[in-house]
Image (spheres, grey):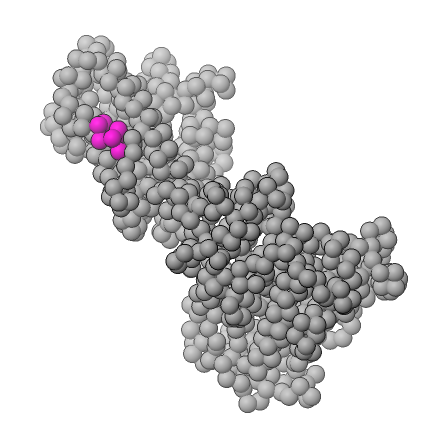
Amino acid sequence: MTMPSPAFNEMTTDGLVRGPYAEIARWLASAPREALEQRRHEAELLFKRIGITFAVYGEGGDPERLIPFDIIPRILARAEWEALSRGLVQRVKALNLFLLDVYGAQEILRAGRIPAGLVRDNAAFRPEMKGFVPPGGVYTHIAGIDVVRTAPNEFWVLEDNCRTPSGVSYMLEGREAMLRLFPDLFARHRIAPVGHYPEELLETLKSVAPPNCRGLPRVAILTPGSYNSAYYEHCFLADEMGVEVVEGPDLFVEDDVVFMRTTTGPQRVDVIYRRIDDDYLDPRVFRPESVLGVPGLMAAYKAGNVALANAPGAGIADDKAIYPYVPEMVRFYLGEEPLLANVPTYLCERDDDRAHVLAHLDELVVKLTHGSGGYGMLIGPHSTAEQRAEFAERIRAKPADYIAQPTLSLSTVPTLVDKGIAPRHVDLRPFVLCGKEVRIVPGGLTRVALREGSLVVNSSQGGGTKDTWVLEDDPADIPKPAEAG
Amino acid sequence: MLSRTADSLFWLGRYIERAGNNARGLQVALRMSSLTRDAAVRDSAWRALLIATGCAPGFAATGAEPTQEAVVRYLAADPSNPSSILSCIEAARRNARAVRTALTVDMWEAVNETWSEARRTTAATFAPDNLPGFLDWVKSRTVLFNGAYADTMLREEAWRFVRLGTTMERADNTARVLDVHHHAIANADQDGAVAYGQWQAILRSVSALRAYHWVFHARLEPRRIAELLILRPELPRSMIACYARIEETLEGIAAAHGGRRGECHRLAGEMHARLRFGRIEDIMTGGLHHFLTATIDRNLELGRQIQDFYLQA
């Protein structure tokens, strides 16, 4: 049950406070415990009043839950962020080039750099997209790249989310809450703003307007509806961008053009930021029983009359079986060495990998190849013998369904918990926007595993969020990589 | 605006208004049944309420006798009755949630808090001792919601559709309340005390008992009651006041849409005009019941036309 090594504490290393956290450490040391509790309570009320909820249906209890928000920020120095963001831009560029390629000439497969079967037999690969170049040549317009940290200069990409990553509303509302609760703390730091994200998103979406768009592109967000877990976010982003949030039945296609039904009659829609899965987009092309989508949408898309973000089929780039090859993509398409490291990954469908995984289940994290949300995971060091036996059986039965990775010792950040202030493991999801150019709002969503020792940060599994600060000036005393840890 | 958004706003207005109307109706029926020892009078008060709220067929399908307890449960709390107060609150909140961005924060909070408090109700909430408090609470919540949207919404399309919902529901309610008692109005020579109780009930059902005295400075008279509820523009729940607002609201929407009009505009204008130039003598001579049922039918037709033209375009 022990962690492989003591986790990197982002605030204090070897008893010394790291530069970016200097002010926060002073504040935490001086603020009375009750005052912090009081602020935490206020933050909760704020979130409740605004109604930021995460809907979890079918598990009993209140279906509209609040994601716990921790008032102690997670801080990155400017230099740390810049290095990270260069790596993110590089990675997302490569992912987009990969998508263009696998739905085009498939050069990377022909060059033998990625096993062709891994792509062609993959459920996330959409043959319907073969030979089609989306407007602007972009497949994944909004990518959420999950990054974890194990040491001052060690960042790892845990997974790429190239389909419909969510969570950006928590980043924005978390910042708003902190600004209201701690104006004095903000005055003592120079923190890079994040509030312009919706504007950047709108610019990104407008920049990929389809070839047949006349005049100003009209953008809409397509939601599965108010029972979707991220419905709040869909409305929030629509409101911030000043665009409509539409459901499938609000749209219809006539002569390969998409219209929305309005009180003034049909209005043409040019760019759709869709937050529904590929499978449900268009019953004529994908699942015929889908009532969430729009019949004829794909034909309109192919005719160049509407843009879809993200493009259908983008999921092949974030599939966990493809993930081990992302560094190869960077080398192949960009001729560069990857700036961000991949976590070593064992594909259980490979015989050697499977043998290794089965022999080391107590050390590894096992995940579903096509899963998400932290469901169906085995965390080896925290597992029981029965759980390991159960997973071993499942892996042997369906090896292609599982991958495994070493259990990383995720960095920790001080967090206000019932017993006081204690370190808790965190990850980071920066949101990378890709239109005519690539843009990243500094920071991202920091998720925190609130249970002591837990490494699972997903909100569906008891995770919370923190505001993420990127400082605009580097503290002089930020420890050099060689001296740290 | 998306047709679906307009639809949700319209029904948000309607459901909140319906919750308030049902609360008022229940208060009146409770009062009538506590003032009489005559079981027949008591039962007729509850039966009348079921008819006035349009819930009689649904209640009959449950197979229950229209006792106070059964009717209260059906109209206040029964989830199988789409017009019960709790169902109205649930539906209003569902519509509000679907169009959060079209609402002001004050409106959303009014609906959302009402909904979360309503979810905490138990069987005890509807027991005879607690029921009056619950009904007062429902009334005050609907007044809060109406105030929130009157005070905080931009005078744009969204506001017009909520207002359209409120006034359509209100017009319908006033016509139904009056119609269910049309005997007491048309046959003034029946048993004095019972009829007087019914007259009071009609006025209380639309919060107009005091208003009557301010307008007429005279004893209750059935013809004047009908005049007040049908033709007097001063009374905010009179049919003419509602139709004036319906027509004005529909015209406002049409003007903002460059004059685009449909059958709903013609129909609303015609109904308003009939009331503006109508005389109570003629209505009574032609038959109050006949007039009211015709109005209720037209009101339904107007709802369908609005639906076709704007809400499901």
**Residue A68, quarter of the rendered image:** bottom right
- Nearer the observer, B202 or A205: A205
Please indicate whether residue B206 sits to the left or right of residue A276 in the image. left
Percent across and percent down for residue B178 are 26, 22
Quadrant where the image shows the N terminus of chain A: bottom right
Indicate the position of residue A200 as horizontal and vertical percent values: 47, 66
On the rendered image, what quadrant is the C terminus of chain A found in? bottom right
What residue lies at 31% left-to-right and 22% top-to-bottom? Answer: B297
Picture layout, residue B3 above or below residue A475: above
Percent across and percent down for residue B218 are 11, 24
Q: What stretch is highlighted in magenta?
A: B265-271
Residue at 15 percent across and 16 percent down: it is B282
Task: Using the image, determine if residue A260 lies above or below residue A10.
Answer: above
**In the depicted view, which residue is nearer to us: B27 or A368?**
A368
| Marker count (numbered) | 0
Residue B167 vs A272, above or below: the answer is above
Specify the farthest residue to the left: B217
- Residue B266 part of the magenta-drawn span: yes
**x, y percentage for residue A9?**
65, 77
* Observer able to see residue A411: no
The one of A130 and B115 positioned closer to us in this rendering: A130
**Residue occupying the point 36% across, 20% down:** B51
Q: Does the magenta stretch include residue A96?
A: no
Q: Residue at x 38, y 49 (%)?
A: B102
Q: Main secondary structure of the magenta part?
A: helix
Residue B85 visible in image: yes
